[in-house]
Each structure stands twice: as C-alpha cells, then as structure tokens.
Amino acid sequence: MKKFDKGYIYSSLLSDLFGSFVIVFIFLKDFFISDESNPADIIAATPIFVIVFIAIYLCFIAYRILYYKTSGYELTAKEIKCNRGVLFRKRSVLDYKKVHAINKKQNIFHRIFGIAILTVDSGSTNTSHQAEITIIEKDKIVDALLNELNSLREGGARKVESSPPKDELLLSKEDSLYRFTSGKKLLYTLINIASTAFFTALFAVLAIITIGICKLMLQQNFLGTWGQYFLFAFFITVGAMILFSVFSLIGCLINSFVGYYKFKITKRGNDIQISYGLLEKHTNTFSYDKIKAVKITQGLVQRMLGFASIQLEVIGYTVDSGDDNKNAGLGVLVPFYKYDEIGEILGKVLPDYVPNKKQTKSISYFSFISWFALILGIIIGVVLLQAAIPMLIFNVSYTIMASVAFAVVGVGAIILAVKALSAALSYQNNGLAISNGKITAYYGGFTKNVTVFMARNLIAAENATTPLRQKAGITSLVMHLKTNALSNEVKVHIQNNALSEELEKMLML
C-alpha cells in the first residue's frame, strides 16, 4: 500500500504552527493584555509561553507523523483501498463501479508544497457526511488519479500492470460551459449590497415608525422634538445601511473573487467537472446520472433585477475535506446568471433538468396566513394580559397603559403585514409541473425556489393538511428525494389534493 506524500506532513505542520500560536494566545490573552499586566511580568512569563507553545506544537508533530505512517492507499484491479487515522483507524474499500463523485482540494499550504487532497465518494446516504476514500499526493499525481478513476468508473476494471495516465485537462479552456467573469462578479457583489441595504432600511423604517408612535402616545420629549427625532433616525438608518453594506461588500468581494476564482464548468461525455478557488482550490467531478436535483434560487432583490443562482444535489459533490467531518449538501453549479437564460445554460450542462412551466398554482391565499395569524393573535393576547395585570396593580395611568397596548398591537400588526406580504409571494410562487417522469416544484416566499428532479429519485410523498383544508380539497405536498438527509424534502403548499394521487402513481412505477 502506497503512503501519502510527505508534503502532507510539511503543509500540515506549517498550518499547525499558526494554530499553536492561536491556541496559546486564547488561553493566555488575559495575562498579556489585561490592565494589571506589566512588561516585567510579561518578560518573566515568556519562557512559560514558549514551553506551552512547544508542547502543543510537539503534539501536532507527533499526530501528523503517526497519521502519515498509518495512512495510505492502493488501486487494485477492481477496487480502491484506503487506510487512515491515528486513534481511530479506518479502512475503506470501494469498487470502481460504485464511485459516485471525485473531488480535488488544495488550500494555500498544500499549494506551497505541491500536494492536493483527492476524495472519492460512493454516494451512500449512510456516509453522506464524509468521503469513503481520501488520498494525499502530489498535484500532478492527483490529477492523473482523478482522470484514471473517471475512466475506471465507466470501465469498472483496472490493469494492475498499467502505468498511470499522463496528466490531461478534462476540456480545453475554450470549451468551458460557464465562466464567472469579473463583470458578473461585480454585478453579483452590487446586488448583494443592494439586498443588504434594502432590508436594513426596511427594518429601520419599521423601528422608527413603532418608536415614533410610542413617543406620540406618551406625549413626551424624551427623544427630542419631532424634527430632532426624524433627523437622528435618518442618520442612524443611513449609518446602519452604510455599515452593513461595507461588511456585505467585503464578504461578497472575498467570496466572488477569491472563493470563485477561475470558476468554470466543463463537460466530457457523461462527466461534469467544476473547478474554482484561489486560496483553496477545488476540482469536483461527478457523473451526470448521479445528480439528484437542481435548485434555482432567487432572492427578493435578485427577482427584481432578473438574476438567479443554480445549485445541484449530488451526494459527495461538496465533500472536499481531508478531515472527513463536513456534511454533503447543495453545491453551486452556477453562482450568478440571468433568470430568463436559465434554460439556455441548463440545456448545455444538464438538458434533462430544464424546468417546465408551472402547471398548477395555489388555490387559497388565506391558508398561507391563517395559522400564523391565529398563533400571533394568541401571543399578542398573552403579552397584553401579562403587561396589563402589573400596571393595574400599581395604578399606572391609562395613557401609559394605552401606549403599551398600542405598541404591542402595532408590533404585531407590522409582523402580520410582513407575513402577509410573504404569504402573497408564496401564493404566487407555489406550484408544480409533472411531465415525462420529471417534476418541477415552485415554492418560497421572499426567496423564490425552483427544484427540478426526476420521478425515479422520488422515494416518498405525503399530504400535510387540516380537516378544514381536507374538506376544501387542498393540501401541502411534501416530496422526499433520494438524497442525503440534510436536504431531501421539497414542499409545495396549498395545492389541489388530487395531485397527491398523481405522485403516488409515480412511486408505483
């Protein structure tokens, strides 16, 4: 069995060096930066600091060496084997025919020493939180293994005496089906900033109105004159919008220009490859027929401007950690694209998953808000009762009592108004399209979602209804997909009850 490349030890110890500093600093920061500390005490304690740091770093060194000595991999005629672990050792064996997804990862420390991590996953729902096989090798060897495993996944057998294939690109750069260009990244960033500013302003205005009503009811000048109040409120709102927009700008720039660095999608035969990342480079490869669902998402501002993102469900697609402790979930297929052109890009990459037009729609708007309004009314009544009893006991003036009651009811009305808007959007969005073994589900309120999946991946369907809704012949449909447990439900609300019978027929096929 071949051991992992020694570059694993060097790259890990380089990152552990920083980790050791962080650990020591966290435990001793109060001593070094407290008001009672002085230079003399810090100098005297420096040897202790150094000893603790060395002890922690020696533990890291011992662990990395032991992990290197106990880990390795082997490619046999029909399967790939892998050993890894120190305290809890793990041995994995995976048949080439059962390989589901192959992912390559490189962080900045790996790139310094020219190594990469290759994870190979079977797509089993029992192990969806980790990859069965982990290989740590030189970058070029990982690329060669990636290509060879792709071939073996189709052929199912390997000639042991054959040498690994030469490094080759999946497709030339000109054949990339999608590129996240700088112009798209800037527009993506601006839309995210606009979303942040919009919701900050919305909540600020609601808060200003609520506080202003309380000020009016109490007829007091504790917030200054009305001119001063609105001036301060305006400056605070603008300041909050600027502050949150700056954080959004920094986060989006890092995410789009660093996280999605050189993002591209390439396709060869039945295989799709997605590569991206600057500090941590990812190369994810999976088979077309292993895709379980495609999800198109639009935030509120994205809907206004006509853009969307596309995600896909492939078990094993996002498992790219050598630590075997990250969950699989929805991976980004296209981070940013015009909504009207979604069919065009999916037609190139995933032609079977182009969404069909909505064939049904929600039947009743009231059902989207009835339960929420009932529960909110009960909560408001309880809060008013709890507030009224102490005020009556202490003979609080009726003006203050009325102000408190008005404030509670006002807050409830604002919450109900927001919910009513969300319900209106849900009423407009929810629907289904079923044709030729493909299901397209439309759902969501402020965020519009469209999920496309094949009937063969539908493992269960259930009705969520009430006696009154059942009499009216309406229900919420819950469809369970053949995916990992984190994202295996698609819910479409307030639909015709007869649709569940059509889904049941699909389950019987």
Image (tube, helix red, strand yellow):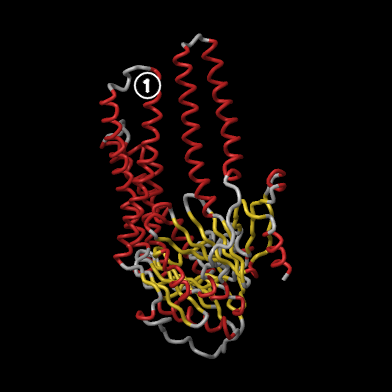
Q: Quadrant of the N terminus?
A: bottom right
Q: Is residue 126 toward the left or the right of residue 335 in the image?
A: right
Is 93 in front, or is 47? 93
Query: Which image quarter: residue 49?
Result: top left
Residue at the (34%, 53%) spot, across then down: 251
Residue 91 visible to the viewer: no
Label 1, secondary structure: give it. Answer: helix
Residue at the (45%, 16%) spot, across then down: 400
Is 41 in front, or is 339? 339
Residue 236 x, y percent position in the rendering: 30, 35
Q: Quadrant of the C terminus?
A: bottom right
Q: Which residue is mark 1?
A: 216
Which amino acid type is marked by label 1? Leu
Q: Residues within 10 Å of mark 1 (few under 14, many from 20)?
A: few
How many callouts does the rendering have? 1
Residue 374 visible to the viewer: yes
Residue 232 x, y percent position in the rendering: 27, 30
